[in-house]
Image (cartoon, grey):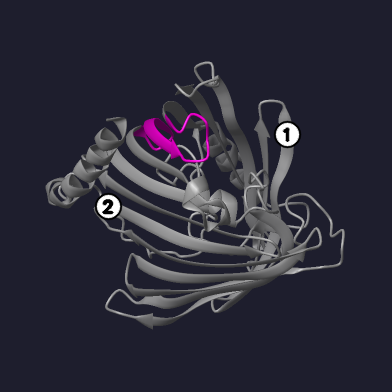
Amino acid sequence: MRKYLSFALVASLVSFSAHAESEVNNELTESETENVIDIDAAEPSGFLTSALNSSVETAMNDDVEYGRKVTAYASAPKFGGYVIGKYSYSDMDGALGGDGFNQRLIRFYVDGTILSDFKYRIQVQTNNDKFHMKDFFIEWQKFEFAKIKVGQFKRAFGFENPMNPWDISTGDYSYFTKKMTGDYKDDTWGGGGRDQGIQVQGDFLKIGEDNHNLIHYQVGMWNGEGINKKDEDGKKDFIGTIQFQPVKGLVIGAFGWTGECAGEQRDRYAFGVKYDSKAGLTVRGEYGHSHYTSRNDDAWYLVVGQPINSWFKVSAQYQTYRKGKSWGDAQCTYSLIPEFQLHKNLKFQIQYNYNNFRGSADRHYNEVWAETYFRF
């Protein structure tokens, strides 16, 4: 019964979204900015960090001792930070009701440019008592068609992996992202899809009346060890993507990965599509296959999000991960996610998950997550 109820909830939302989009067009403020495929664009600042940024920029624009402005050589650094808190309940046998209240993450970051063409970012995070470095990189952005990035950052694999937690529309990353962009076989994605390396990326071939880029690519070489780790075996991972945007907002991508880690060959490929409309409708889906020396896995997901008005959005997600590409061990989850964004710096999200873990003793169980997001 629980299974059929979950199917009905997801189907109802998807069918409703097509009708609802036309009703909310007049209520939403449409952005006229370019649909940027590169996800490293600066994120909004919160209340405190906006005041800090304004003060720093004012100070840097003052003439220094030799009558020069610091901002003639480097932009004022932009600080930002946000917190995601979570409460989770589960009726799975042995879960004792779930994890209860939890600090999902607290992030603080700073980015800016030096000599106009060099962009940098530093980002740190804490999860309860675990403080660690997330990102540190510098990227030469002289040419739009060939930007060179060096440091630690997200691997160029998948649409969802490079997105920050604030924007993915769900209470956690998908099985696809966790299993296909992790460091090792059966990795739980503790590094968040990051590694240290070098990457070239670019956009080119303007088309359409809006003059958007048709093609985006990324190709790079990484250590293959994961976040905050040096190369231990001299092997490297080679990862790349080619993406096409035939219509502004609609992006189709293919991703490839080859490398070796812990003595085991690792080859992966994925395909995906995403669409973001001016009215706020979002659709994103990806399929990935992973081959190891001793096993093949695959995973996929589909998420659809529809604004009801300017502050209320509802999303639905279906996702599956198959260890060994076996339905006998498949993990399938159906989710319904209402989201309330009361301010650009404040939103609340509730997520219901119906889980069908076929290899588990308690195969069918339910979860409820409640998350708070706020920028500071």
Amino acid at pointer 2:
Leu
Looking at the rendering, which quadrant does residue 366 occupy? top left
Category of crowding for the residue at label 2, using alpha-carbon neighbours closer than 10 angstroms: few (below 14), some (14–19), many (at least 20): many
Q: Is residue 240 left or right of residue 355?
A: right
Give the quadrant of the N terminus: top left
What segment carries the magenta color? Answer: 342-364
- Main secondary structure of the magenta stretch: strand
* Image x and y of residue 251, in percent: 38, 68
According to the picture, the residue beneath numbered tag 1 turns out to be: 131
Amino acid at pointer 1:
Phe
According to the picture, the residue beneath numbered tag 2 turns out to be: 281
Label 1 to label 2: alpha-carbon separation: 35 Å
**Residue situated in front as seen by the camera: 41 or 217:** 217
Q: Is residue 205 above or below residue 64?
A: below
Q: Is residue 248 above or below residue 59?
A: below
Could you tell which of marks 1 and 2 lies nearer the N-terminus?
1
Give the structural element (helix, strand or loop) at label 1: strand
* Image x and y of residue 239, in percent: 64, 70
Based on the picture, tell me whether residue 362 belongs to the magenta stretch.
yes
Task: Tell me the residue at 36%/41% (across/down).
Answer: 334
